[in-house]
Image: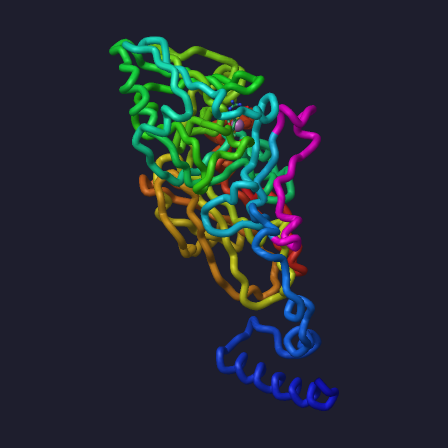
């Protein structure tokens, strides 16, 4: 291309681009200007062939997405093997969490189990104690279900006031996956639960040997023994080769690396249901067996880790809402800390006990905002303010904080976690 031809071609393109933007009313498209060489000059990736089909037998995200990762908060725990990292919610869209970005919570690190050496035992108050291999489990009728998993401690650091600067850290102990597996009911029917059987103990094969008591009614209702997530085998971090799926209930009950199910007539009163995962009230008594996750939402964009960089004008606000009781029927957003509310637009599948995606598009005039979202589920439960929550539950709790989150946006588009109660 000669210099002259290049120059005239650029001139034509420039005119054309402005025309197209004007026609489409494209207020958000950049006018052809400083960066026009990116469209007029041929780039390397346009000139040279790239990797062939054998270079990437298992695909990974673009190198330009390397910042989209799980993160931990080192001062939260003393050791990484009994710790947690957080889903980068501000970098994601839709309702399905990519498999490699699901937050991880383990009590003794990741168990690495060869499926051929894994067994699941069902015993206790049953007619026929049974031991299943992975091959046995795959001969039962399967189902595919999308569910969120939220750790009961999600948002736990925020009970007394704003703490962590980013929705990844305040709300990132959640993921939402499509699970493939077998209804627990099929396996329990095979073993034949005796009439005295009222509770089930689930135990993991990891070094923490984690256990939780689960009411039999729930086990027979919608629980699954899952071996798949998002269409492929579970990841080791999520419990490969099998985990328990306890839809809508606190993440701690979703025992990973599941090895044993015992049927009993009462709960076992183990560590995770006595000293942990109970809610200390103002009067010093603790609420126990608070299994269900309450209706909740958070604005993921904009948020502290995702500031407004484009200045005033059209802005896409987005977030997530969920309820352990079923579907989300409505999400409201406020720009002024809860004085005025507008109904947001729900988009994508609306599935019970799954994440729901909401959007609200508006013109930002550059003024300070106090952004909030408030979810309402199909049973009419409304997400409370933090003050409403504390008036019922006191300020000693860690678990089950579903209070309304506030992000303060300043005129530069910088965003901070604040509390408007
Ligand atoms: N065997 C076993 N299961 C476990 C745990 C564990 O440490 N060991 N952690 C529990 C807790 S507290 C939570 S919140 C979820 C986290 O699931 P994830 O790692 O897939 O996010 O797994 C639960 N199941
Ligand atoms: Mo948890």
* x and y, in percent, of residue 52 in the image: 60, 57
Q: Which residues are magenta?
A: 62-83
* x and y, in percent, of residue 150 in the image: 48, 34
Residue 292 visible to an observer of this rendering: no
* Quadrant in which the N terminus is drawn: bottom right
- What residue is at 37 percent from the left and 39 percent from the top? 145
Q: Nearer the viewer, residue 247 or 280?
A: 247
Give residue 158's quadrant in the image.
top right
The secondary structure that dominates the magenta segment is loop
Total labels: the figure holds 0
- What residue is at 41 percent from the left and 56 percent from the top? 345
* x and y, in percent, of residue 330 in the image: 38, 49
Q: Is residue 264 above or below residue 295?
A: above
Q: How is the image coloured?
A: rainbow
Q: Residue furthest left?
A: 195
- Residue 239 inside the magenta-drawn segment: no
- What residue is at 42 percent from the left and 25 percent from the top? 134
Residue 352 visible to an observer of this rendering: yes
Q: Is residue 138 above or below residue 413?
A: above
Left or right of 117, for residue 329 = left
Q: Nearer the viewer, residue 137 or 331?
A: 137
- What residue is at 36 percent from the left and 11 percent from the top? 123
* x and y, in percent, of residue 186 in the image: 29, 24
Q: Nearer the viewer, residue 31 or 262?
A: 262
Q: Is residue 197 above or below residue 341?
A: above
* Quadrant in which the C terminus is drawn: top right
Left or right of 172, for residue 356 = left
- Residue 73 inside the magenta-drawn segment: yes
């Amino acid at each position: 291309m000669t210099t002259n031809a290049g120059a005239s071609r650029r001139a034509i393109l420039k005119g054309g681009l402005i025309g197209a933007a004007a026609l489409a009313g494209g207020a958000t498209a950049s006018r052809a200007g400083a960066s026009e060489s990116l469209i007029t000059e041929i780039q390397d990736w346009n000139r040279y062939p790239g990797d062939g089909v054998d270079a990437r037998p298992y695909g990974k995200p673009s190198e330009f997405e390397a910042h989209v990762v799980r993160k931990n908060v080192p001062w939260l725990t003393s050791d990484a093997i009994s710790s947690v990292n957080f889903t980068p919610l501000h970098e994601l869209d839709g309702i399905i969490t990519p498999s490699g970005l699901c937050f991880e919570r383990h009590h003794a690190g990741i168990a690495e189990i060869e499926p051929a050496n894994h067994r699941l035992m069902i015993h206790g108050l049953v007619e026929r104690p049974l031991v299943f291999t992975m091959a046995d489990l795959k001969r039962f009728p399967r189902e595919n279900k999308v569910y969120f998993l939220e750790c009961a401690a999600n948002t736990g650091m925020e009970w007394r006031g704003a703490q962590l600067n980013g929705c990844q850290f305040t709300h990132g102990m959640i993921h939402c996956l499509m699970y493939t597996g077998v209804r627990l009911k099929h396996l329990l029917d095979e073993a034949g639960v005796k009439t005295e059987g009222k509770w089930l103990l689930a135990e993991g094969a990891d070094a923490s040997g984690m256990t939780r008591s689960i009411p039999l009614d729930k086990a027979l209702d919608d629980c699954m023994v899952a071996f798949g997530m998002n269409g492929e085998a579970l990841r080791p971090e999520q419990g490969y080769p099998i985990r328990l799926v306890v839809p809508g209930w606190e993440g701690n009950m979703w025992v990973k690396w599941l090895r044993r199910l015992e049927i009993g007539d009462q709960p076992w009163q183990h560590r995770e249901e006595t000293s942990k995962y109970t809610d200390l009230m103002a009067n010093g008594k603790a609420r126990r067996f608070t299994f269900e996750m309450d209706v909740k939402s958070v604005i993921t964009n904009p948020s502290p880790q995702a500031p407004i960089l484009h200045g005033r004008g059209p802005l896409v606000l987005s977030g997530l809402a969920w309820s352990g009781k079923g579907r989300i029927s409505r999400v409201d957003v406020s720009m002024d800390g809860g004085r005025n509310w507008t109904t947001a637009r729900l988009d994508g599948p609306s599935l019970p006990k799954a994440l729901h995606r909401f959007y609200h598009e508006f013109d930002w005039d550059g003024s300070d905002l106090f952004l909030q979202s408030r979810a309402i589920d199909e049973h009419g439960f409304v997400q409370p303010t933090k003050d409403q929550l504390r008036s019922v539950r006191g300020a000693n709790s860690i678990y089950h904080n579903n209070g309304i989150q506030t992000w303060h946006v300043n005129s530069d588009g910088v965003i901070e976690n604040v509390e408007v109660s």
